[in-house]
Image (tube, coloured by chain):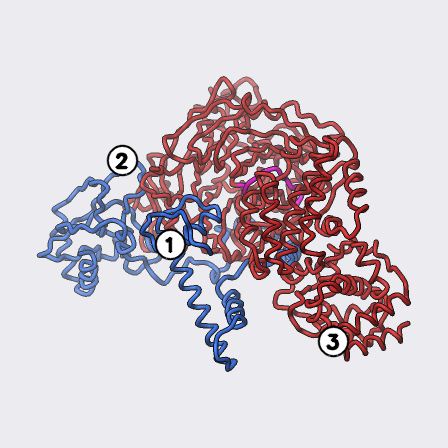
Chain colours: A red, B blue
Amino acid sequence: DRQTLVAVLQFLRRSNLRESEEILRREARLLGDDLGAAALSPAGAGLLGAPGGDADSTGGEALLSRVTAAAAIAIGGSAATVASSSPGVAAVAAVPPGKGGARARVAGSLGPRLTSRAVSRGRFASFFRLSYKLLPYANVFAVGGGVVVEDQPDVSAVLSAYNQQGDPTLYEEYYSGLKHFIECSLDCHRAELSQLFYPLFVHMYLELVYNQHESEAKSFFERFHGDQECYYQDDLRVLSSLTKKEHMKGNETMLDFRTSKFVLRISRDSYQLLKRHLQEKQNNQIWNIVQEHLYIDIFDGMPRSKQQIDAMVGSLAGEAKREANKAKVFFGLLKEPEFDVPLDDEDEEGENEEGKPKKKKPKKDSVGSKSKKQDPNAPPQNRIPLPELKDSDKLDKVMNMKEAARRVRLGPECLPSICFYTFLNAYQGLTAVDITDDSSMIVGGFADSTVRVWSVTPKKLRSVKTAADLSLIDKESDDVLERIMDEKTASELKILYGHSGPVYGTSFSPDRNYLLSCSEDGTVRLWSLQTFTCLVGYKGHNYPVWDTQFSPYGYYFVSGGHDRVARLWATDHYQPLRIFAGHLADVTCTRFHPNSNYIATGSADRTVRLWDVLNGNCVRIFTGHKGPIHSLAFSPNGRFLATGATDGRVLLWDIGHGLMVGELKGHTDTVYALRFSRDGEILASGSMDNTVRLWDAVKAFEDLETDDFTTATGHINLPENSQDLLLGTYMTKSTPVVHLHFTRRNLLLAAGAYSSQ
Amino acid sequence: MEPAKMASPKSAPKDAQVMAQILKDMGITEYEPRVINQMLEFAYRYVTTILEDAKIYSSHAKKSSVDADDVRLAIQCRTDQSFTSPPPRDFLLDIARQKNQTPLPLIKPYSGPRLPPDRYCLTAPNYRLKSLQKKVSSSAGRITVPRLSVGAVSSRPSTPTLGTPSAQTVSVSAKVGTPVSLTGQRFTVQIPSSQAAVKSATPTTPTVQNVLINPSLIGPKNILITTNMVSSQNTSSESNPLKRKHEDDDDYDNL
């Protein structure tokens, strides 16, 4: 067999396509072996790593690996094509290693001609597909696969996913056939099966575009794009602008969409129904696509209702697989360190934490929590290294505690007062706001690349004196910390120049010594708030950085940008410590968990991911938003996460179980700001529709049903209680709300820029 | 591209109407009118660049006229150069895996401000920021205010208003360290006759006294003019003829 095949291939080199076809077919029937077509169908995703290619290019050895990779990726177990050519494939694969190079050249010569042969292309595609798959078995992979280095190997790999092709004119038939089937199915199954429409539509359209059937693609789009769900309209608009194959190459998000599998959660009954239907028909392109591009997460149980499904879908990659949300997450808080602080006299009216009767002599006042037991949900103290507490930090904690004693207890009967800081004359240039934890300073990042810091209290901003002056002061005096400050330049406003693009994110450090700002120029800058100068520029993202935040303990900070990753940095490393890659589109919002062990990122691909700082793994994926996410807030107890997006909904998530536990509807425009009150009783949300809304968080999180079915499948029936949870709506005249902050005494501060239209 | 039926004003040229239609097709409904101009300019510049490149390629290939392949090649080369896109996903996953394998470094206690090694910091700038009226006053109109040399003047803004473009003050700390940027709303008003360069020339007072502010139209500021400072400023100015020259340049710029 091998020798004949070798002969065949050598002959092929010298002959044209038609003859080689004949020969191979003959040989194929001789061998008559259906080499595990079934085994090949799930092979698609696994072979993505190899460079693929478009059949138009004419590199020699390169082409074999490319085409075969392409073919392999495009394997969809298409019954018709596989059956006829698998024997031929087996033949090719069995060719001894020595002929690897020759084969490559052969494939190379065949490659360009593939394009011209519509009918046979399908067969050859599968031919090469299977040959590629078998190459590893035959141990010839090294030669073919190792060769290549494409300029854009990954792009080609992705694009080659569409090398397989059915008849372009029949695509509309296939799609409408499926549509008809689904619409005629039982009600209980229809909702679930309707999830198939969108990914199938997109993949079929892209296949047509890739294979350069522009007119068919257009008519396909025209006919069916109106049937899709309304929340996919933005994607469809982008898709409508992709009419040629060249357009696909530049669009990273669409490319990622192709390589990643769209996840659908379907009950077993519905799935059986679908599978039976698709397998009955022959030559069905849809079954190919389903197998190649969709990951169907099957669960046992009742099919979901349309309402349940609508709550969870919407992201660019479908829903999240159930096992993606099963990792253990330490959502508890770290124990506060205990240290002795002498109580001042004025504190005697404050509540003593221990509740003991007050005595005259100074008592130990421990800042830490009382319980000696480790919270099982809290991470170990040294799971990630954290900076030690300095004296100034301890003083700050004492101050925090004193303020906490005077804190107003909020609730449905006791709503917070809201103090709104309006930025005037910003001419739509205000792009980021942050307020320090003790509410003493407010910073604004602007589109003119400046960062402006204001003092909110009557105390002005002072910078440290210059070195010459510092040498003149008396270092032994008691008030040396006051003397080092320069009175002459004290002012309420300091402007920081340095960025070369609009500043999209700002963050104060917890100890108020540093300020971070991230900008469209791709850098994150660290500014000192003692000298009001720039200290470091962290370069890593080469694309706009959309958000940054300091860790609650200082020292670490996270940034997320257009390059679809979030990075964890430490102030004393010029390179990131961790890179969190996985999102399909820009990372628009990044927040630390209160225990600093996890980072939540919201993205333009409409998912929220929770990452572990220790090892960079993604431990949770939350889908359900229908637009890019712009705000995230962790509850103070660390158990829950609130997210807000351009769809105007605020979603609440239980981190421990990985479930959606609430949906707050009410805003009509993007929710740009979310904040929990200091004890977690109230959730405040601010939006582009010029309102601040207060929601009852205690009520939203009580009575969570977490029975076995829910935890197993992740499906929860959300009660329609948004109106009950809404405690108040407060409108500004025409100022979108960009930032919210609860002071230590539970006064709500809000910030936004007045826009006159 | 079909000509748009709807458009902005009827007098808009055909190109602008086409661009408006494109924006509409892509779902952009609200935009400032000058966006169309910017898009048209971009389109024109892009197309001419591509076509010029294509001409070069076709003449290199000794062809008589430019054909589609030349244009395709030109587009491909320019795309790699100007419109870079972020790295592809598996590359990112790969480097992420490498980065995430190293454990988090331990933190040394009591080490002062935690910053990277000096060569990666910006703590030693070799420049100072001078007055930035040019940047600031571009939007608002310029008013020539009769100039009086004034000493330390500070006006007190009533609210933390932003847009009053307070000019960046001149940081004229002569020799020492980090530039101190002043942002009070201060005025320098100079008497044309005296042409005094108001600078705090003495090295021991690093703070800047004068600021050339864009006299904006937004609102009058409270000005405290301490006239007794004038004489001292005059003397200091005479002692620095060189610096005065700088000031003169700025004056001309402001006029």
Mark with earlier residue (2, 1): 1
Residue A314's x, y, as percent? 61, 40
Instruction: Read off the residue under disc 3.
Output: A105
**Is residue A678 in sight in this rendering?**
no
What's the residue type where badge 3 is placed? Arg
In this rendering, position of residue A326 left or right of residue A23: left
Chain for mark 1? B
Rendered residue at 79%/74% (across/down): A19
Q: How far is the residue under mark 2 from the one under mark 1?
A: 45 Å
Residue at figure coordinates x 71%, y 34% from the top left: A190
- Image coordinates of residue A663 in percent, x first then y, are 58, 30
Query: Is B34 within the magenta?
Result: no
Instruction: Write down the chain letter for disc 2.
Output: B
Q: How many marks?
A: 3
Give the magenta part as a residue range: A618-629
Numbered circle sitting on residue B16: 1
